[in-house]
Image (tube, rainbow, N blue to C red):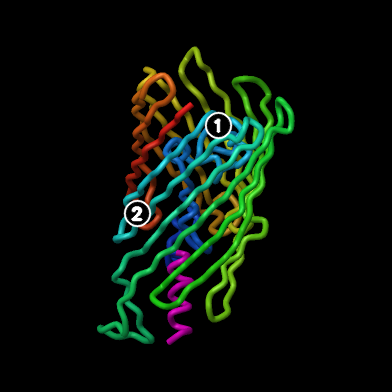
Amino acid sequence: MIRIRTGALICLSALGLSTVPGWAQQGGQRPAAYLSFGMGGTQSAMAGAAAASRNEPSCAYWNPSGLTGIKGFQFETQYTVLSEGRFLSALSLAGALKREVYFGFSFINYSAGSDLELRTGPSYDPEAVVGNLEMAFLVSLAAKLDRDWSMGGSLKLFVNALDDLGGVGFGNDLGIQRRLSKQTTVGFMVQDPLSFLSYSDGPTEFFPTTLRIGLAHSEERWGGKGNFDLEWSQDLGFRPRGGVEWRPFETLALRGGAWVGGLTGEGSGDILVRFTAGLGIVIPTGDNGLLEFGYTLLPDGLVERGYLHQVSLKGKFL
């Protein structure tokens, strides 16, 4: 029974969807596959093109060196309504220490539900009905090397639980950015170079390493910005990502993006194009802060032609 539960936990960690090509391209065969959704309403709506993003708490996930753009204190919380009774939530906090060292703390929480059925063989009646919970904690630090260059890194803790069976793992990320001008930034990120997840009765899964190189450019006079990332991972190969944002008013942001999978790596030849879209409504809270309510529409890798809904709340206090 222990082995059966261990296998179930591993399958749940990968969402049990290795036979679905679309989800495989989104990361469904990986340990802690829920992390493939990323963090941040802005970044999600722009298809995860965020290696060169700055001044956002969610930079801790996409490229921790981007935390050096933080001013004051910021937070962001989000909730994603997934299909099949699953849920995904996240919280990010970020700030500056005397404008020399920048910090971030992030928490991601995923569950496939509380009514999961365990069986040792084919039968109508399960041997047990259990719930699962998967969590990731990120502690990030970043610093400016000079006026143009910045560097940052994250240490990660993974915790999985399925009934009385558990898994624990550790990981790390490292990123750098260079500001070419006030409007343009380039970034490079190494995600999970040494990340793993071990289960209580022995099996250990290692995360595939992912590399991202990105470009971000903004035009204040038009109220717009565009990001482009070229991503490569050991399992999924190359996946380009691009996103745009347009602010027709100071209180409204319209966002969209797309990513392409199946070019190389697992599932290559079955090329997939997935689109994202979202908006943000900004509410000033005085001279030193603002709140932004966000909504994002994401592709669902489990339901063909299905979409997921994500809501977020972001606060900035200078």
Q: Is mark 1 on a helix, strand or loop?
A: loop
Instruction: Tell me what residue is drawn at x 35 percent, y 83 percent.
Output: 119
- Which percent across, then down, holds residue 8? 43, 75
Question: How far is disc 1 from disc 2 in space, using C-alphas?
Answer: 38 Å
- The image position of residue 39, as x and y in percent, is 47, 45
**Observer-nearest residue: 53 or 285?**
285
Residue type indicated by callout 2: Glu
Whether residue 225 is visible, yes or no, is: yes
Which residue has dot 2 on it? 304
Ranked by sequence position, the earlier of labels 1 and 2 is: 1
Q: Residues within 10 Å of mark 1 (few under 14, many from 20)?
A: many
Is 2 inside the magenta-drawn segment? yes
- Displayed quadrant of residue 282: top left
- Name the residue rendered at 48%, 71% in the picture: 10
Please say whether residue 138 is one of the residues in the magenta stretch.
no
Residue 214: x and y in percent read 62, 36
Q: Give the range drawn in magenta.
A: 1-14
Q: Name the residue under label 1.
A: 70
Please name the predominant secondary structure of the magenta segment in the image: helix
Numbered-mark total: 2
Q: Where is residue 199 in the image (x, y as percent from the top left)?
A: 53, 74
